[in-house]
């Protein structure tokens, strides 16, 4: 038996060539992510050096960070005038399912994700589900969106049966790429590997908040089977259908 499994650095896997990052906090000064335009531009240069082709900016919208869609659109438009690189930039949001969310959904005050704008990226507390989680997901669908659950592997309260129930109810799951390398602990890593091996993810994002991680991420190592499963998710490109 081999004493170790062969691993490959993310950069060498080629996964980043043409990659779309479906989750990032790079739009500067709107949440707990990147703070300055200069830093955001540096990150995008690093992304370009990895071969990343498209990035979705998904700033938080929550009671503690009550960004409006109009202000985010304005900030995004301003940022675009500063960026002269080749990466295609898009704006959506990461919606916390808290007391603010449903009134905004009702008012159409949302920034959807995906080429056809047919998905809403949502998150919950890491510790507890919101009251009536499945009712909220139904109301999202009634408005014409697929709920796309951000980093499902990182919620402490979610178990394998929950993921199956979410998908059976029409929600889609978005992997946080860095869960696979243990950035969020062994439990998240194990759940991510389990979900990935079963083909239960439909999109991949980095949830990038800091340049330091971006500079390191090309060196993160993955096994061959994980790389192959990731390739399948990326190639399927479900959110652009
Ligand atoms: Fe995020």
Image: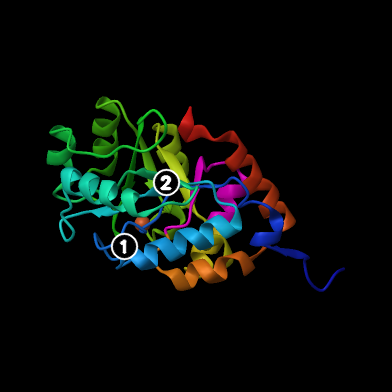
Q: As drawn, which residue projects farthest toward the right? A: 1
Name the image quarter holding residue 25: bottom left
Contact, mark 2 vs mark 1 (Cβ under 8 Å): no
Q: Residue at x 29, y 58 (%)?
A: 125
Q: Which residue carries the number 1 mark?
A: 127
Q: Residue at x 85, y 69 (%)?
A: 2
Span shown in magenta: 192-207
Q: Residue at x 47, y 31 (%)?
A: 240
Please name whichever residue, 121 or 55, is drawn nearer the observer in this view of the structure: 55
Q: Is residue 224 visible?
A: yes
Q: Position of residue 9 (x, y in %)?
A: 68, 64
Q: Position of residue 107 (x, y in %)?
A: 13, 33
Q: Residue at x 26, y 51 (%)?
A: 78
Ligand 1 quadrant in view: bottom left
Q: Residues within 10 Å of mark 2 (few under 14, many from 20)?
A: few
Q: Position of residue 13 (x, y in %)?
A: 70, 56
Of the two numbered discs 2 and 1 on the same chain, state the one appearing first in sequence: 1
Q: Which residue carries the number 2 mark?
A: 162
| Residue 101 part of the magenta-drawn span | no
Name the image quarter holding residue 127: bottom left
Left or right placement of residue 21 versus residue 28 in this view: right
């Amino acid at each position: 038996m081999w004493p170790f499994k062969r691993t490959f650095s993310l950069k060498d896997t080629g996964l980043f060539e043409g990659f779309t990052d479906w989750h990032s906090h790079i739009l500067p000064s709107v949440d707990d992510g990147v703070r300055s335009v200069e830093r955001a531009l540096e990150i995008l240069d690093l992304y370009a050096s990895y071969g990343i082709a498209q990035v979705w900016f998904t700033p938080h919208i929550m009671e503690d960070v009550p960004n409006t869609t109009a202000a985010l659109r304005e900030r995004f438009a301003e940022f675009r005038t500063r960026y002269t690189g080749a990466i295609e930039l898009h704006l959506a949001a990461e919606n916390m399912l808290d007391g603010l969310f449903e009134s905004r959904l009702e008012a159409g005050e949302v920034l959807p994700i995906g080429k056809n704008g047919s998905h809403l990226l949502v998150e919950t507390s890491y510790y507890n589900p919101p009251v009536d989680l499945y009712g909220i997901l139904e109301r999202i669908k009634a408005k014409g969106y697929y709920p796309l659950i951000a980093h499902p592997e990182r919620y402490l309260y979610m178990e394998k049966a929950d993921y199956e129930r979410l998908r059976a109810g029409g929600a889609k799951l978005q992997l946080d790429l860095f869960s696979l390398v243990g950035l969020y602990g062994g439990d998240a890593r194990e759940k991510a590997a389990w979900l990935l091996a079963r083909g239960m993810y439909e999109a991949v994002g980095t949830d990038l908040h800091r340049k330091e991680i971006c500079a390191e991420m090309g060196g993160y190592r993955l096994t061959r089977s994980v790389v192959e499963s990731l390739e399948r998710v990326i190639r399927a490109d479900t959110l652009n259908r």
